[in-house]
Amino acid sequence: MENKLKYNRVGAVSLGCSKNTVDTEIMLGELASLGFTVVSDPAEAEIIIVNTCGFITSAKQDSIDTILDMAQYKTAGSCKFLAVTGCLSERYRNELPPELPEVDLFWGVRDYPAFARELYRVIAGEEAPSSDEASSVPHSIVCGDVHRLVSTPPWRAYLRIADGCDNRCTYCAIPLIRGGRVSVPMEKLIDEAKALAASGVTELTVIAQDTSAYGIDLYGRPMLRELLAALSAIEGFVWIRVLYAYPNTITEELVDAMRDDPKIVNYIDIPIQHISKRMLTAMNRHGSAEHIRQICAYIRKNAPDFILRTTVMLGFPGETEEDFNELMAFLAEQPFDRIGAFVYSPEDGTPAAEMPDQVDEAVAEARLDAVMRRQQAISLELNKKRIGSTVRVLVESVMPSPKGNGYTAIGRSYAEAADVDGVIRLRPESGRPFRLPQPGEYVWARITKAYQYDLEAVVPGE
């Protein structure tokens, strides 16, 4: 394919969630297939793409700050063209252009399939030709007519099984930005997963806005259990992890299937947001407090090795001290191994933004602090119980000692999800011959020390 691009080198900054990461990977894969050269350093890029997040106020501000930072490369670097995509661009597509004249192109999430070809048209001054195969680009896969340049380390990748959400929680702008849930047909997911496995991926993380509702729009019922079984049958995967599983569609059968499949790690992320019936109703959360209690109790009884992660929101409109105390009591009686907590942020266009009894920010922040202080103590206690156990660890980085008599490595077991949980710091057994592990390798290690979020472990000698 003749390259008619006056600017060729393209780099991207991906903000926000892992779903956004997949969008960025597909954009870069499509651009590579059209003849663009992907670079990792924005200072070297002639075209910079900022894939933004617009979920909450702090994320929006971070997106604006990053856009302005990248715009500086127009004078201090090689940048000739700045494009902004993602949720912020979709949500404020009319308001942003006059406020950010540094940006040459704004593009929303619902137009992603056409982005690469539009960028080519703008840069080259003519319509894009047919895509070349991108298989020669390192860490890239081709699935059907979609090219994807995977940006995570070569041994792990995300599989996005749906986009958009039908839950319509009153605080959430995601359905306004991305629309209702659209599940990817299972056969396409299997093809993509096979391509990822063939490229060397051994840890696959299954994601969506609501993973446990996968398939309802296509097949009339949740199909996550069937999808996981099909993914497990693919040769090459060692770990398959599930994030963002909403409690209302988590069943005992799904838990049992995950527990009994050796490739599905005993880890599940269940964002409950709250336990007060009043709050769940005001949030329009699907599923009851009773079901949350029941499914958590079932997991603890029937799958005791499971790591439970959740997300809770503090300061939602109308949250009283009684509601907060009920949440704290639940988190004490039903300890989660991992908790992500955040303060409610009123978002334009959402019902919650117009609700009365908005909680004072200082009160909400104090409640957040109380939850996290409680969780730090719980996390430390749970980690201490792991001391002495031997776990399989996926090594992610290795630093040999200067004298060649040891090393320090960073890794994760099944109990730690990448980027959101703690890590395990590894060292070789003292006084024994050792072999230097490689990133992407799985090793067995004995846990020797526990901290609030991280662990230390020893790898037995040869």
Image (spheres, rainbow, N blue to C red):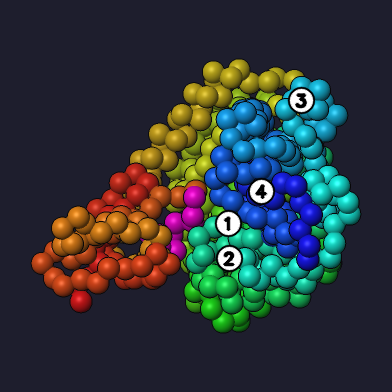
Q: Quick one: label 2 or label 1, which is nearer the N terminus?
A: 2
Residue 290: give x, y in percent of width and height.
Answer: 63, 50
- In the image, which is nearer the foreground, mark 4 or mark 1? 4
For disc 2, the neighbor class at 10 Å (few under 14, some 14 to 19, many from 20) is: many
Q: Quick one: label 4 or label 1, which is nearer the N terminus?
A: 4
- By secondary structure, the bulk of the magenta-drawn segment is best described as loop
Question: Which residue is labeled 2 in the image?
Answer: 139
Q: Is 95 above or below relative to 270?
A: above
Q: Quick one: label 2 or label 3, which is nearer the N terminus?
A: 3
Residue at position x 54%, y 45% from top? 41
Q: Which element is circle 3 on? A: loop
Mark 3: amino acid: Pro
In the image, residue 78 lies in the stretch drawn in magenta: no
Q: Nearer the viewer, residue 176 or 62?
A: 62
Q: Nearer the viewer, residue 361 or 10?
A: 10
Labelled disc at residue 10: 4
* Marks 2 and 1 close (CB-CB < 8 Å): yes
Q: Which element is circle 2 on? A: loop
Q: Quadrant of the N terminus?
A: bottom right
Question: Which residue is labeled 1 in the image?
Answer: 151
* Marks 3 and 1 close (CB-CB < 8 Å): no
Residue at position x 49%, y 50% from top? 419
Highlighted range, magenta? 411-419
